[in-house]
Structures are given as structure tokens and as C-alpha cells.
Amino acid sequence: MLDEVEDTTKYASVGIVERQYAHFDETLYLRGGGVLEGFTLAYETYGRLNANRSNAILICHALSGDAHVAGYHTDDPEEKPGWWDDAVGPGKMFDTNQFFVICSNVIGGCQGSTGPSSRAKDGKPYGLRFPFVTVADMVLAQRHLMDRLGIQKLFSVAGGSMGGMQALQWAVDYPERVGSVLFLAATARSSTQNIAFNEIGRQAIYADPNWKNGDYYDGNAPANGLAVARMVGHITYMSESSLEDKFGRRTQNGNRLAYHFNTDFAVESYLKHQGEKFVERFDANSYLYITKALDYYDVADGYESMEAALKQVQCAFLVVSISSDWLYTAAQARELVDGLQAVGQDVEYRHIEATFGHDSFLVEVETMTEIVGGYLGRQLKGESESTEY
């Protein structure tokens, strides 16, 4: 945690924030061969950019995230804050007293950035006409945003899960524009198991009769399929022990044996609720495109090996893994750490003992603030630390 921050501001909110939109007329040439003739990125900013534009941190979001990382859009007391509100603000992990924080919705998304639900030139939603996008394409679009904001070099690029992949790709594709990378609960290469779980979710969407091969925007969305996809995904974000502690084998109807063809167990009710909430804010086609981008992610793509890709890097790394994370495991994190060390890059590795599974990087606020906030503080002072936990 940064020493300069007083306890009175420790948990302060960034308050009311506004979603902004950057519209680009440039053609975006994508890795898969497709093109976008112009595109839009939705983004939010927090804190102030300093005079020499050297204090900017880009936070990259995960699969189900968006640009609204912190604060509120209205003064409605019922509104929930941004998805990482505990981490962004005065005196928090990403201290807006010191840093200018940016978060944008990825290209291919559905929260303001150009994606499958956006209108093509013919006035109709792209649907499956939307070109295939990769994590590298998401980063390319973000680079255009940084150009628009006049930020030539980011103090740090940070992200958990898919956000970590984007942060890593920034360091490989635009090494001269990144001061450090915060790689949290992520992987440098999607595993076969990662791909398998994503495919189950996609098959659930395909099987929904409302999907209609992606052409559903004039009718009912494939809500049931997307809800099941979210349920499957959400299980991978947790751990067996966290599910056991939270729900056990509790039923919705006491101890009476019955099958109601609905939700008998508490954990079933929880997953159903998560699925229902998700379909209110997410587009099924975006889910398909983004999970495919995840599946194809391999930092070595275009290089002979991971080490060859990592030789492009010019910045320091903080790599964090979670003991109970079985989606992106500690072994996957170590693979990146070993690769960075093999090519002589500056890397600090922290392994956190936590029981919440993959989502621990969001839930373990105090621990993450100590590790990430402490790292950023040392980077500000030009210090480094190689101790591993």
C-alpha cells in the first residue's frame, strides 16, 4: 500500500463517472484477415493526467467486464458500483490521487464498443458478419485510444484473467509504450481445459432456438443458452472449497426429499441467478467472439516460441497467481515467469494463498492492494523487489 495515502481516504469512491466514446474513422486491420471500416471504443477515466502525461494506467477487463471499472453512473442509491470499485480510487490499489486510470470496453464487446450487436454500414447489426477478433486486436484498438488521448507511454498496463492477456500482449506488441505489466490470475496461453469449458458455453448458445445463427436482434435473444454459458463459466471462477463454504448441500426446501424440476439446492439457485443477471447486460454473439479470442490466445503466436515473443518486452512485470485458481493455474503463471526470466526480463512473482478460486484477485482486496499497490509504489520510486512468495 502506498505510504503517502492517509487512512481517511483509504476507501473513498471516485464518485459519479461518465462513460465516454471514442469514434475512429481509421480502418482496423485484424489479425484474422478481417477489417473494420471505422470503430468505436467506450471508455472511462479516473483521476487526472499529469502535465507530462506519464501517470496513466490502463486496466484491461476480463471476459464479462466492461469499461465501468469504478464509481457510479448516477446518484441512485440502488445502483451498484463498477466491477473493481474496491481497487480504483483515492488511496486504493490503483490510487487516483497519483494515477490517471483508463478502462475501455474491448472491441467485439457489447457495452458501447463496436461488436456483433453494432450496426454495420447497411444499418443492420453485424451478427456473425462481424470479423473474427483476437486479444491482439483488442490491444490494437486500445492503442488507437491511447493515441487519441495523447498518451505515448503507459505507466502500467494491468489486468486479471483476459485482462492479463491483454496486458501481456501490450508489452509484446508495443514494448516502447509500456512501463510495467500487472499480470493477475491469467495465462500466456489458453490450455486445452480452458478451451473445453468455453466450448460448452458456446454449444449452449448454439442450442438455443432463439440464436438463429446469430441473427436474433429483431426478436428474442438466446437468453436461456447464454444463461447456461454463464453458469458454466461462473463455476470455473470459483473453487470447490468456496462453493462448499458458501452453499454446502443446503436445499431450498429444508431436508424434505423432492425433485421440483427447478432449483432444489442452494447452489443451483445461485447459478441460475447469476445466469439471469448476465443476460440482462451481455450479448450472446459477443460471448461467442470473445471466448474464441480467449481460446486462440497464445503469446507465442507469430513467433518461434514464447521466449522469442518475450524478447520483445522492455518493461518490468508483476505476475500474481492464486492457490485455488483452477481456471488459470499457478503452473501457467510460472510458465510466464520462467519465460521472462529466461530472456533476462525484470519480473516479480507473487503466489497468493486464497480460497475463493479465480475470482480471488477481485475478492482479496486487502492482499491485492498490498501486493499491487506496493509494486506500483516501488515503480514510482524506481525500486524493484525479486522476493517470491
Image (cartoon, grey):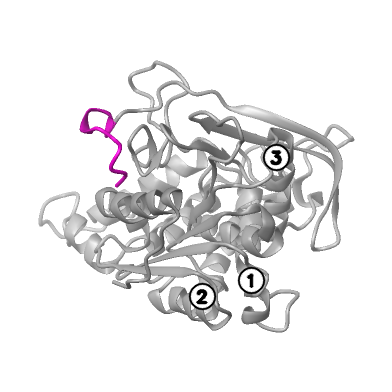
Q: Secondary structure at mark 2?
A: helix
Q: CA distance from mark 1 to mark 2?
A: 10 Å
Quadrant that contains the C terminus: bottom left
Q: Earlier in the sequence, mark 3 or mark 2?
A: 3
Q: Residue at x 64, y 71 (%)?
A: 299
Q: Is residue 206 visible?
A: no
**What is the span of residues highlighted in magenta in the rendered image?**
1-11
In the figure, is residue 149 to the left or right of 83?
right
Judging depth in this view, the residue of 41 and 168 nearest the camera is: 168
User: Is 32 located above or below residue 9 in the figure?
Assistant: below
Location of residue 27 by image quarter? top right
Which residue position is annotated with label 1? 299
Which residue position is annotated with label 2? 336
Kindly identify which numbered label has been placed on residue 145: 3
Q: CA distance from mark 1 to mark 3?
A: 22 Å
In the figure, is residue 185 to the left or right of 146?
left
Check contact, mark 3 vs mark 2: CB within 8 A: no
Q: Position of residue 320 (x, y in %)?
A: 39, 65
Q: Residue furthest left?
A: 255
Query: How many residues crowd around disc 2 within 10 Å: few (fewer than 14), some, or many (20 or more)?
Result: many
Check contact, mark 1 vs mark 2: CB within 8 A: yes
What secondary structure prevails in the magenta region? loop
Q: Residue at x 50, y 52 (%)?
A: 158
Three-letter code for the amino acid on which mark 2 is drawn: Leu
Judging depth in this view, the residue of 264 and 123 nearest the camera is: 123
Three-letter code for the amino acid on which mark 1 is drawn: Val
Q: Earlier in the sequence, mark 1 or mark 3?
A: 3
Three-letter code for the amino acid on which mark 3 is drawn: Leu
